[in-house]
Image (spheres, grey):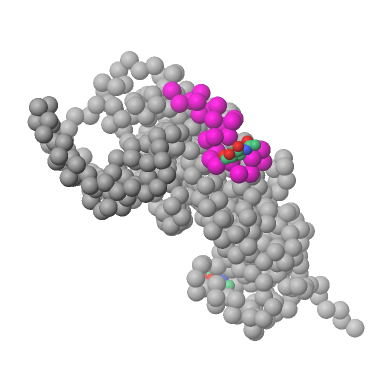
Amino acid sequence: MESSPALSRIGLAGLAVMGQNLALNIAEKGFPISVYNRTTSKVDETVERAHTEGNLPLFGQYNPRDFVLSIERPRSVIILVKAGAPVDQTIAALSANGRGLLYLGMGVSGGEDGARHGPSLMPGGSHQAYTNVQDILHKVAAQVDDGPCVTYIGEGGSGNFVKMVHNGIEYGDMQLISEAYDVLKNVGGLTNEELGEIFSEWNRGELESFLVEITADIFRVKDDLADGFLVDKLLDKTGMKGTGKWTVQQAAELSVAAPTIAASLDCRYLSGLKEEREKAEEALKQAGFKEEIGSVTSGIDKKRLIDDVRQALYASKICSYAQGMNLLRAKSVEKGWNLNLGELARIWKGGCIIRAVFLDRIKNAYQRNQSLANLIVDPDFAKEMVQRQAAWRRVVGLAVAAGISTPGMCASLSYFDTYRRGRLPANLVQAQRDLFGAHTYERVDRPGAFHTEWTKLAQKSGSGVGALH
Ligand SMILES: *[C@@H]1O[C@H](CO)[C@@H](O)[C@H](O)[C@H]1NC(C)=O
Ligand SMILES: *[C@@H]1O[C@H](CO)[C@@H](O)[C@H](O)[C@H]1NC(C)=O
């Protein structure tokens, strides 16, 4: 009697770059996997890779029915196709009817390489579905000192939401790094070689992270088509796929201030206006604009500037992460997800694009105090902010004087200076609102809602005003 072939532990449909790499990763960890894609060449390609990358237990399937039947029960299938209609189409193709389906929406970060060798995974949705694949996810995810970079995030769309905010934070990190580069290059006069060295050095300290590491590498690459360094030849127009925009939209919806992430998004929009910017540069030159960089850079203490920029970058990052974390908490409260912010910081320590040593400190801050209102007021971070604020202000001040925009660092500093002040000029805004719209106001010294006839009273007491002139 012929025995039926052994069944796969899991299936994966959608064999674009991420799908292929994740499938190979799963197979490599010892879980037999079936793979499927409508385009059969994709299946062949993946099977071929599984063969050359070590005879991995990966099995190509060429129609939806065979694919589904080749997986052991309860059948778990990872669908890695474009968001929207393709997802619905794939689900329809794989299930005769929708009964008994459990859904898990999983954020995957780390790009191609992460998917292949260990990503950060953010699964949310059905807890039963998570339990069914937990052992696989734990092995496949990046591993750090305190465990695999995966945890059950929460119900509903929480996994995808957390991944979205991760990307918003990533926008902020990249913007802040580019500003550090701008200041070091244009105020400090650093060469690409020096920049490469500085970022490498930073990557050995508190700023140690994937993004700082790859930035150091970027400064070392020579142009292979012409003289000089490649980084100087790249068009200064940033692309984007939407996750930063969604993060800022969600922050606005939930009334959470996320100015650093918003500034990084705005900067991408402005970067896109390359031709307009070139014309503006010309128009302002003709109007008499003079670059102030020269007067600022003369006599600059390079060593001190470098150290100041490092501190400014670190402090700015803390504020940016504080914004992202507070956005996550606000959504968690709205949806009842019960997100564990310390765990989220932990699973970002490895695999993903924002992986960084300082995420361990963020994890600790939330473990010390689950209900921490803001990272800035955690005793450890508060101390770090205080230690760095002078350097931070020097960098932003220098940049402003030199006419070099640092929207991310400025947004973070303003966030810090607004959040830490017990009293803001919002009293004046309230007065204006009450004057023109009778919106009423509260007082600092007694309860209740008040309204004042501001204009009438001002006219009555206005007699003396002229004397001031
Ligand atoms: C298969 O591959 C094509 C092209 O790469 C892609 O558009 C499609 O969504 C894939 N997925 C499935 C499940 O067929
Ligand atoms: C935890 O944080 C909240 C909000 O920031 C604060 O009110 C509370 O005192 C903190 N608890 C401890 C034990 O530090």
Q: Quadrant of the C terminus?
A: top left
The percent coordinates of residue 278 (x first, y second) are 23, 43
User: Is 360 left, or right, of 177 in this rendering?
Assistant: right
User: Is 183 left, or right, of 61 in this rendering?
Assistant: left
The percent coordinates of residue 464 (x first, y second) are 12, 30
Q: Is residue 308 visible?
A: yes
Picture quarter with ligand 1? bottom right
User: Is 157 left, or right, of 229 in this rendering?
Assistant: right
The structure residue drawn at horizontal position 51% and vertical position 67%, both measured from the top left corner, is 83
Q: Nearer the viewer, residue 197 or 47?
A: 197
The structure residue drawn at horizontal position 34% and vertical position 26%, both measured from the top left corner, is 397
Q: Is residue 232 magenta?
A: no
Relative to residue 49, is residue 282 depicted above or below? above
Q: Nearer the viewer, residue 145 or 443?
A: 443
The structure residue drawn at horizontal position 55% and vertical position 38%, both measured from the top left corner, is 375
Q: Is residue 381 magenta?
A: yes
Relative to residue 315, is residue 354 depicted above or below? below
Relative to residue 291, is residue 57 depicted above or below? below
Q: Is residue 44 visible?
A: no
Q: Pick out the residue farthest to the right.
A: 1
State the extent of the magenta-drawn residues as a range: 367-390
User: Is 254 left, or right, of 227 in this rendering?
Assistant: right
The structure residue drawn at horizontal position 53% and vertical position 56%, both measured from the top left corner, is 331
Residue 193, quarter of picture: top left
Q: Nearer the viewer, residue 46 or 466?
A: 466
The percent coordinates of residue 77 (x first, y second) are 67, 69
Task: Name the chief secondary structure element in magenta.
Answer: helix
